[in-house]
Image (cartoon, rainbow, N blue to C red):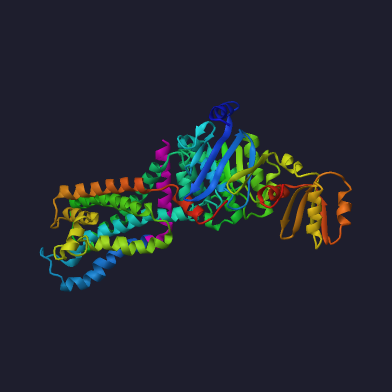
Amino acid sequence: MSRAEGDAAEANPPLAVYAEGLGRDYGATRALAALDLQVPAGALVGLLGPNGAGKTTAMLLLATLLAPSRGRARVFGHDVGRERNAVRRRLGLVFQEPSVDGLLTVEENLRFAARLAGLGGEAGRRAVEQAMEHTGLTARARQPARQLSGGLRRLADIARATLHRPDLLILDEPTVGLDPEHRDRMWSLLDRERRDRGATILFSTHYLSEAESADRVVMLAQGSVVADAPPAQLQAALGDQVAELDGDGADALVARLKFEGVAVFAHRADRGWRVGLRGSRELPADLAAAPGIARLTVRPPTLEDVYFARTQPDAGR
Amino acid sequence: MSASSTAWGIVVRDLIRSTRQRSRLLSGVARPFVWVFLVGAGFNSIARLEAGISYQAYAYPGGVVMAALFGGMLTAISTVYDREFGMLRLMLASPSGVGAVLCGRTLSAAIIGGAQGAIVLACAPLAVHLSAEQYAAAGAVLVLTALTSATLGLLVAARLTSVENFGGVINVVLFPLLFVSGALYPTRGMPALLRGLARVNPVTYMVDLMRHAFGQTAEFPLAIDIAALTGSAVLAFGLTALLFDPEQRFVGRKRAGEGG
């Protein structure tokens, strides 16, 4: 896309995030090669990829906490390099590790965050009260943050990031280390941010099931975008079914499936092969009858299959 | 509005933190008393001071400066902890920008250092008699001393990446600044090299200015002391603004291969 086309694409409808060739190097290391991204306002977009793929770098660039080495990006029309403060006014950030001060109480942490966001006095007090109420932390208001469990710290983090009602939430692995109950609570809070205020959410996660409800998934591998589409579309592209198989004859069977053009992708993991299959419904029976197959499971494609197919260099798509 | 709100938020947070770190606060106040009254008791028997005052009275202005210097610098240097444990990025992500963060940090460190110095100053009658005017003058000097100490601390923190360096900073930066300042003994008898270092040491001028306020014999004219301290504070703050790298934490971690 040319710069003129890019500008046109940005103008209407208004995009929450627009990035074109956005990249960042750390010395000789290329962390993010070139990110092209268009996120409409109000969307939920998941950023997926292996460790070191460039997800955090992409988020820090969009959050104006890193300067790009190349390319450009805008948040609600504001350039992330030249209009940092205007971008920051629209942002709520959650980092990989909880950012709460253990020596301060929950309420003091939130008051601190409110002041950083420019909310002082009565407006700040009201914003903190509402944030604690929404996250269910009111009863913990006077408790030092160091006494909170990991899950509650994360909720305090969400309260901190949302109390100034930002238009764009950038969340870097917000549910890492949380039990299912707290993960569910966190997603319910984020759903409410979208539903009630129309907030745009860009998040990264290694829990791929969390990304299945996203409007779009962007997958990164080795600093480059390798997939960008709605989850259902990405899953459908893997074929009709996915077979997980293992055994002495697995390699030969996969080679045969590839030769016959039935395998959309094939990835060898430690636990065996994952093969995306297109075509006839009789295939599973055909596979089960193959010699030397010790384990065979056939199921619909998941986002995890997409992850392996798109981010692993040997996936053979 | 946003910049002052950010700076004020940082000040409030730091003040709350410091009141909850009582042992640190107490040790900051106790340090000058240990020197003036314990070490000073020994010095008193061997030191011959020209003005005919006790060593405790001589060292007291230095003790007040010591409290403000350590309190201010260590609070400012604790920016390194915030960088290490992720709180600094929250501040840097505020719409007010780095300038407001540095101003807030300077102000909070100056208040904490100044408060520690004020406690020691309030106890001055234990060693020396001060008039109301001298107290007022010493209070004003304390403000300038604490502000300068805060900017010096921030300058040290600007490029410090790890809390592991923190203890070393006290030994390598703070103690030498204090020992080569005339706070605890006159610089006149020191070797030429150390005397030269004392001349470029901002703490020398803090102590000298405090001696003016205490009505003791000072080495430099009042105007020189004030100019040297104001210049040091402005220079240190300016250098900090130049050297402070908002990306340092992220880049450091990425080079170490962390994160996604």
Quarter occupied by the N terminus of chain A? top right
Q: Nearer the viewer, residue A108 or A28?
A: A28
Asked whether, in this view, residue B15 is left or right of residue B237, the answer is right
The percent position of residue B124, horizontal first and vertical second, equals 23, 60
Q: Is residue B16 magenta?
A: yes
Q: Quadrant of residue B17?
A: bottom left
Nearer the observer, B247 or A282: A282
Residue at 51% from the left image edge and 53% from the top image edge:
B254
Out of A52 and A168, give the one closest to the viewer. Answer: A52
Asked whether residue A166 is in view, the answer is no
The extreme front residue here reads: A259
Please state the horizontal and vertical placement of residue B208, each as a whole percent of the image: 18, 55
Expressed as whole percent of the image width and height from the top left, the position of residue A290 reads 87, 57
Q: Is residue B108 magenta?
A: no
- Give the vertical position of A189 relative to B85 (above or below): above
Q: Residue at x 18, y 62 (%)?
A: B193
Query: What residue is drawn where x is 29% and y is 56%?
Result: B68
Q: Which residues are magenta?
A: B1-24
Of A190 and A103, the residue lying toward us: A190
